[in-house]
């Protein structure tokens, strides 16, 4: 059991040292330097949560709410800083998916039992 935990720790260190993780850290640091983009992202998340809550409660979503969400989305995707951040996130997520797939492929026989 100890060996497995040590291997997991080594895998975690390798992932943290990967180019995908380094790119994500750099993109996040760059994003955090831009208060305006961060504020737009915060507003977008709040508006998206509001719309999701209305949907969950089967309440009508006003046109103004939809427009506000779209306007905030448009502001975000027009930002090169945000584009770089999301591209870095996708690269990292892809790496994690590949790691997960590789582990799952080795466990498939064990999990069938």
Image: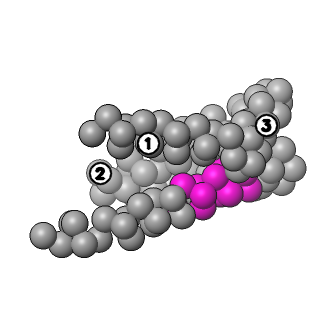
Of the numbered discs 1 and 2, the one sitting upstream in the chain is 1
Q: Of helix, strand and loop, which one carries label 2?
A: loop
Do callouts 3 and 1 mark residues in contact (Cβ within 8 Å)?
A: no
At a point 75% along the width and 48% down the height, the residue shown is 19
State whether residue 70 is above or below residue 16.
below
- Mark 3: few, some, or many residues within 10 Å (few <14, many ≥20)? some
Q: Which residue is mark 1?
A: 8
| Residue closest to the far right | 80
CA gap, disc 3 to disc 2?
A: 39 Å
Identify the main secondary structure in magenta. helix
Of the numbered discs 3 and 2, the one sitting upstream in the chain is 3
Q: Answer whether residue 75 is visible to the viewer in this image.
A: no
| Residue closest to the far left | 113
Is residue 94 one of those drawn in magenta?
Answer: yes
- Mark 1: few, some, or many residues within 10 Å (few <14, many ≥20)? few
Residue segment shown in magenta: 85-97
Q: Which residue is mark 2?
A: 57
Q: Which residue is mark 3?
A: 26
């Amino acid at each position: 059991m100890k060996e497995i935990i040590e291997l997991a720790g080594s895998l975690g260190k390798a992932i943290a040292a990967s180019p995908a993780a380094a790119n994500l850290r750099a993109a996040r640091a760059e994003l955090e330097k831009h208060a305006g983009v961060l504020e737009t992202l915060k507003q977008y998340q709040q508006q998206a949560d509001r719309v999701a809550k209305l949907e969950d409660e089967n309440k009508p979503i006003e046109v103004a709410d939809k427009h506000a969400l779209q306007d905030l989305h448009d502001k975000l995707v027009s930002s090169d800083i945000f584009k770089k951040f999301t591209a870095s996130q996708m690269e990292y997520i892809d790496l994690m998916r590949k790691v997960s797939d590789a582990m799952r492929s080795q466990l498939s026989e064990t999990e069938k039992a």
